[in-house]
Amino acid sequence: MTEIFTPDNLIAGDFPIITDTATVVSGEKVVRGTLMGKITSGGKLKTCFSGNSDGSENPYAVMLEDVDASGGDVAGANILLTGELNSAALTFGSVDTYLTHKNAMRNLSMFVKVPVAA
């Protein structure tokens, strides 16, 4: 079987990339590039949304893979902790955009770049 690689351009520069693994909380279904927040109680990750009030309103990491935790927690999910990121390849909770979280992400050494039209 042959697989086809289609780059998503999530990584947008040469800033050092640091990765880790984490547990995505039950009920989440996220795609690569989703900004994740860390729930204060228990430390599991869920989609970062400024309207949350459980700690996950604050950026923590970006998903490096699609994860379907609709049937229960998923441990060992690959996440990105630092790097330069393409704003067009990022996904945010609800109505949030990269502008909602850009400054907080910068404090975590996640730098958002906006693609320049050709």
Image (cartoon, helix red, strand yellow):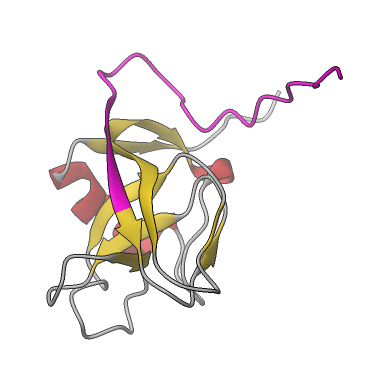
Residue drawn at x 48%, y 77% is 27
Position of the N terminus by quadrant: top right
- Count of labels in the image: 0
Q: Main secondary structure of the magenta part?
A: loop
Q: Which residue lies most toward the right here?
A: 1
- Image spot of residue 88 (x, y percent): 58, 44
Is 29 rendered above or below residue 26? above
Q: Nearer the viewer, residue 113 or 91?
A: 91
- Image spot of residue 42 (x, y percent): 15, 72
Residue drawn at x 13%, y 45% is 107
Q: Which residue lies most toward the top here?
A: 14
- Image spot of residue 71 (x, y percent): 54, 74
Left or right: where does residue 93 sit relative to residue 29?
left
- Image spot of residue 101 (x, y percent): 31, 59
Residue drawn at x 33%, y 84% is 51
Is 78 rendered above or below residue 37? above
Q: Nearer the viewer, residue 111 or 29?
A: 29
Is 36 colored magenta in this rendering? no
Left or right: where does residue 13 sit relative to residue 101?
right
Segment tinted magenta in the rendering:
1-22
Is 23 rendered above or below residue 1? below
Classify residue 55 by image quadrant.
bottom left
Residue drawn at x 51%, y 76% is 95
